[in-house]
Amino acid sequence: MNKNQEIYKPNKRENAKITRLCIAAHQDDVELLAYSPILDCYNNPDQAFVAVVTADGAGSARTGIYKDYTDEQMAQVRIKEQKQAADVGQYLELHLLKYPSSKIKDPKDTDIVNDYIKILKDTQPEIVYTHNLADKHPTHLGVVTKVIKAIRSLDKNIRPKTLYGVEVWRDLDWLDDKTKVLLGCDTHPNLERALLGVFDSQIAGGKRYDLAAEGRRLANATFFESHSVDQYTKLNYAVDLTPLIKDDNLDITDYILSFIDQFKNNVKSALKNVL
C-alpha cells in the first residue's frame, strides 16, 4: 500500500448502496470512461458511484500556464481537479492511490492488486467499469489486467456481477455490433461538460479531452446504426469482460484477440460480398 493514498468522501448518503465502481488509471479517466454509471447514480438516493484513480498524475503532458510545473506540482493540481469532479458528480467516494505509472505497468507488482482487492471487498459493487484490453495506453492496460487479477482473487460469491472495459485511448467502434455494450450518455449534458471542464490542467495544458469525449459519444450514437434513426444522442462503447471474472482459466490475451479475429472476419466477409 502507498502510504500517501487518500480517500475523499464528498457526498454523504447513508442509505445509498454502492452499485457502480470505476477503477481507472489517471485523473479524468473516470469521467471519460464512466460517465454512464455516474449518470445512473446522480441524484439517485438508492444507488451510489465510487471512483478509484490509480496514478499520481505527475507525468501529465503540460503547456501554457502549466508548462513550468514540476511533476510534484502537477500531481497536486490533478488531485485537486479530481476532487472537484467528485464533488460535481456526487461520487460517494474517491480513492486516490497515487502510484507512479512505472509501478502500474509492472506485471510483477502486487501492491496495487492488493489495494484493488481491499476496495472491492469494502464496496462490493454490482458492476465494475475499467479500461479495455485493446486500449493503446500501457498504463491503462496495467490497470485493467490488475483489476482482473484482483477480482479473480475474490471468493466467487462476493465478486462483481459484471465487468466492463470501456474505450478511452482507442475507441471500440470496431467491435461487432452484437458484442458492443452500449453505455448511454444522453442526459445532463451540462453535467458532462462540468465534469470534464474541471480538468483545466489538461484543457489549458494542451489536451482537449472535453471536446474529444463529447464528440466521440455523439459520433458513436449517430454512426452505430445506418438504417434506422438514432436510439441515443450520446454513447460510449464497452466490451464485456465478465467471462474473465467468471472463468479464472480463461486466457486474458486470447479473450480480447477473439474480438479482433471477429472484426477481421467481418471485414473479410463484407468485402467478399461485393468483390
Image (cartoon, rainbow, N blue to C red):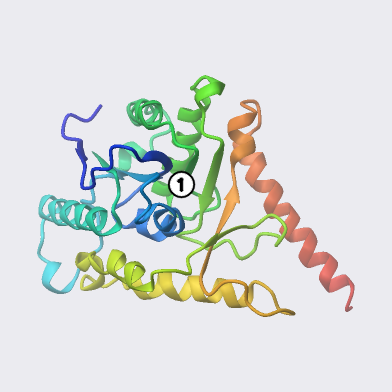
Query: What x and y, as percent, mark residue 228?
Result: 72, 79
Q: Can I make out residue 27 in this image? A: yes
Judge from the rendering whether residue 211 lies leftward or rightward of residue 72; answer left or right.
right
* Residue visible at 63% across and 77% down in the picture: 230
| Left or right of 256 on screen, residue 1 | left
65 left or right, relative to 236: left
Q: How many marks?
A: 1
Front residue (pair 31, 97): 31
Q: Nearer the viewer, residue 267 or 226?
A: 226
Type of the residue with mark 1: Thr
Q: Position of residue 3 (x, y in %)?
A: 17, 29
Q: Which residue is mark 1?
A: 130
In terms of depth relative to the viewer, which is nearer, 113 or 183?
183
Q: Could you say where residue 170 lies in the image, as x and y percent from the top left?
A: 51, 62
**Label 1: how many Cα within 10 Å (few below 14, some 14–19, many 20+):** many
Image quadrant for the N terminus? Answer: top left
Whether residue 99 is visible, yes or no, is no
* Mark 1, secondary structure of its residue: strand
Answer above or below: position of 67 versus 130: below
In the rendered image, the vertical position of residue 159 relative to residue 189, given as above or below: above
Q: Position of residue 245 (x, y in %)?
A: 58, 32
Is residue 150 positioned above or below 81 on the image? Answer: above
Nearest the camera: 1 or 39?
39
- Measuring 12% from the left and 50% from the top, which residue is drawn there? 72
Q: Pick the quarter of the image with the C terminus.
A: bottom right
